[in-house]
Image (cartoon, rainbow, N blue to C red):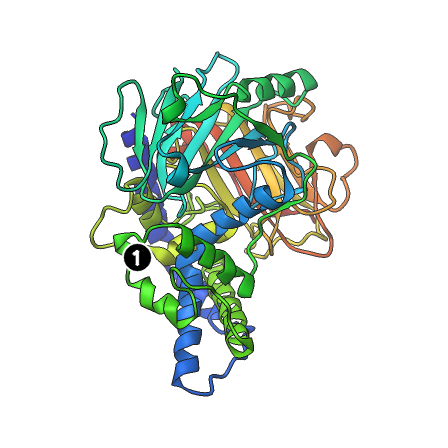
Amino acid sequence: MYKSIIFSLFVIIMIACNQSSTESKQTKGNADTLTTTSFIPANIKEQMMYQRALQAVIWGMPAVNYDLMLQEMLTKTAGKQNEIVYWSRPVDWHNQTLTPNPDAIYFMIFFNTKDAGPLVISVPPADGVSSFAGNIDNVFQMPLEDAGPYGADKGAGGKYLILPPGYQQKPPSGYIVLAADTYEGYALLRSNLPSHNDADVAKAVNYGKQLKVYPLSKAGNPSETKFTDASDVLYDATIQYDVKFFRSLDRIVQSQPWLTRDKAMIDLLKTIGIEKGKQFNPDTKTNDILNAAAKAAHDYIEVMYDAGFPPLNSDAHWAVPAMPELVKAGSSGYTETDIYPVDARSLTYAIGYVGIKRLGTAQIYLIAGKDKDGNALSGAEIYRLHVPANVPTKQYWSATVYDRQTHALIKNLSRASCASNDKTVQKNTDGSVDVYFAPQSPAGKQSNWVPTDPKGQFEVLFRLYGPEKALFEKTWKLGDIEKEK
């Protein structure tokens, strides 16, 4: 079933890609002229450094994205690797990770097998009300496996055993074995909410606290798993397009083994001062070049973003925020010999995080940054999204607003989404829902209103948890966001 759904999704995206190729090329042609970088190399050495640094940003995006989340936990909370950091209520703007879901309870495990050896993540069974939508990724956010009803345990619960790179011993029976090619990585487990009331939030938290993490060597008598609540922490993992990006990248190079497919980057990174076993300490000139290259990489990512992802339907801007080649490569572990879509990967992990092995099963995401007329979404305007009745989802749908520049929740706003698991949302007589995005609530629309910042632009992610075939078969369609006249 999983394979058929994934294949259907892949075909849909490919068809949409063909339908939109002309429009995308035209958009890209206009955006290609945009740049904010004024760096002029003095010699060929500086030119090589600049170009290689730019490419390092594109290649290293998912790993730096991961490192930024890890560093926030290590420096701002009491949490450590091989423990669990969680948010005891739906996340608000204090969670500045990329496009988080404010309609679920988040549990994250940053694992490290280098010293601990094989590590067990024990996932409880779904109980009919409580369940996880979970994903386990390596440092480069390549999915190792999914967990929960749509994952390898199929909702029965299971013990996921993460093996370190090069592990040679035969693992014991009774585990879902994941052979990782990096020592570190993380698991993101979303404890699903039937509603936002206090009792359901508490139930989702208590269900999540049944998770266990421990080394395989202590499986006979594991110590109690430590949980750290990060709900009140300003947890900022937004991408910084300056020399700080390369400091994160250096931490990855120093701590992880080189993957065979990435060895071409070894000498390229040496050029910019990143080399395994050596301290990264750029001088003033190198620092300037790295800052310029990071900004140029951001310009390039903006060009790709503005060109857009292939739309799901030809008559609306909604698109899955992952290029077809990345879906194919990532879900298979990058085993294809003729594709390695680092550009597409950098775009996806510049705006979000987590790799999903079975995209379109536990959840699917649609992104839009433009209205029906093709204009960028402005926080100063009033927009309406009409969500037709009978949304094809087994659990819930949500429409969430993010800052267009940072791809995080907009700071200092009271709420970020309108979701069907919020029982206060008003339905129309036919079962459809109108969602409003505006700096102030339209009269009488408070429960269906998502606030925006009038000083900036925004983007919207439409989530379906437990999506059903009507979405993929296009018998149910989501129309564009429309500007109110």
Residue 34 lies, with reference to residue 194, above or below; the image says: below
Residue 310 lies, with reference to residue 388, above or below; the image says: below
Q: Which image quarter is the N terminus in?
A: top left
State the residue lying farthest toward the right: 443
Could you tell me residue 165's position as x and y percent? 30, 42
Could you tell me residue 445's position as x and y percent? 74, 33
Which amino acid type is shown beneath numbered disc 1? Asp
Residue 187 visible, this orientation: yes
Name which residue lies at 26% across and 41% down. Answer: 166
Q: Nearer the viewer, residue 206 or 128?
A: 206
Q: According to the image, label 1 marks what residue?
A: 262
Q: Nearer the viewer, residue 11 or 386?
A: 11
Residue 355 visible, this orientation: no
Name which residue lies at 74% across and 38% down. Answer: 414
Could you tell me residue 155's position as x and y percent? 40, 18
Please indicate whether residue 152 sits to the left or right of residue 409 in the image: left
Name which residue lies at 28% across and 63% down. Answer: 264
Q: Residue 187 is drawn in which quadrant? A: top left
